[in-house]
Amino acid sequence: MNEEILCSEQAWQTAFETGSPAASGFFSYMRCSEVNYDENTGKVDVIFTINENGTNQVKVSTIEDTPGSRPDSIQAYSPAGAFTIKPENFKKGVKVFTSEATFKGEIDMAPWMALVFPIRFEACVEQHGLTLDVADAQVTFDVENGTWADGTADTLTRNVEVDVIKMSEGSHVVAGTLAEEMIPAGMIAAEGYDQENGAWDKELVTEENGLIFLEGGIAAMSEGETANDILTIGYTYSFPGKPGEPNPGDPNQPAYPGEDDNKPGEDDNKPGEDNKPGEDENKPGTEETGKNPGTTGTVSGNKKPSGNKGTASAGTSAATGLAGVLGLQALSVAGIAAILKRKRK
């Protein structure tokens, strides 16, 4: 409670005028003159006095001729800022005030009129009690590289009731509880993905008020925003690719899992194809450098064109020793086996 606002005569005048725009003529002479507050009982006395232009009276012509000077009803509102709700009291279903209010008072005209026509009033007015309806937060669940237990893969949304929790003086959070039964289970991996190693992208917190949706406890929403645009936490369950196998549809994976760009079982040179049977290591007319007749470049042991995929690159064989015999086949076990086989013949 802000007692300075609560006891302000101008604040109450503004509250009544704003709440009853059709009674503008009435409030041109009905002025708030006094406000008393009893902190023991919580009672507030708001006193209005008929006072047109400082005369403490009102002219008959004003009442007769001024629009809105004789309203059927007026609305009683407390001044803006007089009462506030502490953030930690923002809990769903909390009743802020009762649904009944008592208004009583009297209207005194000129003394001689009061003797003849005394105006007194007292009534118990039913009003709409203010009960807090704090918006729910949302938790969303997504699945990647698979489906939910029912075979669908759409985003699942769960509503979570939240409260504003006071952490320390001036520090609040908006928090809620994620129940175990809200969490999807039985997810199914798509073909080519590892069913046994699916996992959530972050830890699922199921402790009471363990989900923190808003650190500050208070948020200003932009135009068009709703509470769900702010109070939302998302989880994603995904399946990894199977060990040693490419992820389906991943263009960055090699054509054959666990291998180089060459297919399994293939080396840069196929076994037994170094030279055809009966041919020497260098074809007729070639020198030890491995150059073929009519060519100007050095050829490698790889029989594929250099533009093909593969990690082997063109190179020049050594001139002496085993390397001179094997050339680039020195790293190929299959190539060595083929040469030894020919030598035995």
Image (spheres, rainbow, N blue to C red):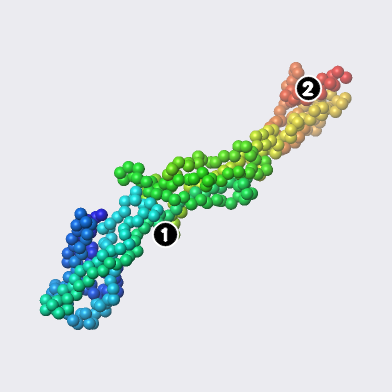
Which quadrant of the figure has residue 286? top right
Q: CA distance from mark 2 to mark 1?
A: 76 Å
- In the image, what residue occupies the spot 23% across and 69% down? 122
Classify the position of the N terminus by image quarter. bottom left
Question: As rendered, which of 129 and 134 lies closer to the eye?
Answer: 129
**Would residue 21 be visible to someone looking at this image?**
yes
Asked if marks 2 and 1 touch (Cβ < 8 Å), the reply is no
Q: Amino acid at mark 2?
A: Ile
First in residue order: circle 2 vs circle 1: 1
Question: As rendered, which of 131 and 308 lies closer to the eye?
Answer: 131
Residue topped by disc 2: 336
249 versus 71 height, above or below: above
Looking at the rendered structure, the secondary structure element under dot 2 is: helix
Classify the position of the C terminus by image quarter. top right
Q: Amino acid at mark 1?
A: Glu
**Would residue 14 be visible to someone looking at this image?**
no
Judge from the rendering whether residue 74 lies leftward or rightward of residue 240; answer left or right. left
How many residues crowd around disc 1 within 10 Å: few (fewer than 14), some, or many (20 or more)? few
Q: Position of residue 185 (x, y in %)?
A: 58, 44
Question: As rendered, which of 330 and 281 lies closer to the eye?
Answer: 330
Which quadrant of the figure has residue 70? bottom left
How many residues crowd around disc 2 within 10 Å: few (fewer than 14), some, or many (20 or more)? some
- In the image, what residue occupies the spot 23% across and 64% down? 12
Question: As rendered, which of 249 and 91 lies closer to the eye?
Answer: 91
Q: Position of residue 204 (x, y in %)?
A: 50, 41
Q: Disc 2 or disc 1, which is closer to the eye?
A: 1
| Disc number placed over residue 196 in the picture, else none | none
Judge from the rendering whether residue 284 lies leftward or rightward of residue 266; answer left or right. right
Residue topped by disc 1: 223
